Image (cartoon, helix red, strand yellow):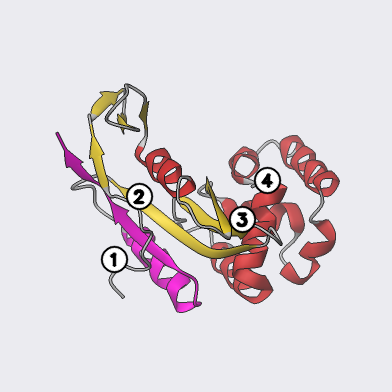
C-alpha cells in the first residue's frame, strides 16, 4: 500500500509561512492571519474543520508510548478494559503511574477517556490486543502522530478512524514508523503518512 496516498483525508497538504522556533518548525494556520502551529496541529485543525451533515470531526495527538501506557494502566488483557473505562478508574491509573517514578513517559502518553472510547470503537478488542502485544517489546517504536476520527451526530459513536504520521518536506520516515503503518494496515486499520508541501 502507498503510505503517502491512502486512506484519503480530504484536507490540504499545503502549508505557508514556515518559521523555526528552537528545534521546532511552525507554519501559518491560515495565510490570512499570523497564528502559527506545528505540523501535527495544522493537520488536526484542518481535520476538525471538515464539514458533514451527519458527523463531526475530531482527533488527538498520540503519545509515543500510548499502547504501553494503556497496558500499564488497564492491564495486558484488553478483554478486561471495558470495566476500567471510567474517569474514576483512569484517574486511579494515572495516580499509580505517577507514583511509580519510572512511569513518566507512560503517564504522558495515557489518553483521555474520550480518546480511549474512540480507540475502542475504531480498533475493537482484537486489534487493540495485537497492538498492545506488539508494543510489549520495548524495541518497537513508530506510533503515528495523530488519531483522527469522525463522530456520528446522533449516536456520538466514533467511526472512520485514521492514524496519521505527519512529515515536513524532505523529512525521512523512520523504519519503525514505516513498519508501524504497515502493521496497522495489515490489521485492517487505516494508517498513512501525510507529507506537507510548502508554498510561499
Secondary structure of the residue carrying numbered label 2: strand
Q: Quadrant of the N terminus?
A: bottom left
User: Residue 156 placed where, x, y %?
Assistant: 69, 58
Q: Earlier in the sequence, mark 1 or mark 3?
A: 1
Q: Quadrant of the C terminus?
A: top left
Q: Which residue is mark 4?
A: 112
* Mark-to-mark CA distance, 3 and 4: 15 Å
Residue in view at x 47 percent, y 52 percent: 51
Residue in view at x 75 percent, y 41 percent: 94
**Disc nearest the viewer among 1 and 2:** 1
Q: Which residue is mark 2?
A: 166
Badge 4 density bin: few <14, some 14–19, many ≥20, Cα 10 Å: some
Outermost residue on the left side: it is 200
Instruction: Point out the stretch of residues depicted in magenta.
Output: 175-200
Q: Earlier in the sequence, mark 1 or mark 2?
A: 1
Q: Which residue is mark 1?
A: 5
Secondary structure of the residue carrying numbered label 4: loop
Amino acid at each position: 500500500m502507498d503510505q503517502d496516498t491512502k486512506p484519503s483525508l480530504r484536507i490540504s497538504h499545503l502549508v505557508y509561512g514556515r518559521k523555526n522556533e528552537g528545534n521546532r518548525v511552525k507554519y501559518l494556520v491560515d495565510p490570512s492571519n499570523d497564528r502559527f502551529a506545528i505540523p501535527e496541529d495544522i493537520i488536526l485543525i484542518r481535520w476538525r474543520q471538515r464539514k458533514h451533515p451527519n458527523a463531526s470531526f475530531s482527533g488527538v495527538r498520540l503519545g509515543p508510548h500510548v499502547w504501553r501506557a494503556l497496558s500499564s494502566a488497564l492491564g495486558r488483557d484488553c478483554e478486561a478494559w471495558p470495566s476500567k473505562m471510567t474517569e474514576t478508574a483512569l484517574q486511579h491509573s494515572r495516580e499509580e503511574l505517577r507514583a511509580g517514578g519510572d512511569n513518566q513517559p507512560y503517564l504522558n502518553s495515557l489518553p483521555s477517556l474520550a480518546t480511549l472510547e474512540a480507540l475502542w470503537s475504531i480498533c475493537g478488542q482484537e486489534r487493540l490486543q495485537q497492538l498492545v502485544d506488539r508494543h510489549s517489546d520495548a524495541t518497537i517504536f513508530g506510533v503515528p502522530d495523530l488519531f483522527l476520527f469522525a463522530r456520528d451526530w446522533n449516536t456520538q459513536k466514533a467511526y472512520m478512524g485514521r492514524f496519521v504520521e505527519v512529515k515536513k518536506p524532505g523529512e525521512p520516515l523512520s523504519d519503525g514508523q514505516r513498519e508501524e503503518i504497515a502493521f496497522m494496515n495489515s490489521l485492517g486499520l487505516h494508517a498513512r503518512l501525510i507529507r506537507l508541501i510548502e508554498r510561499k
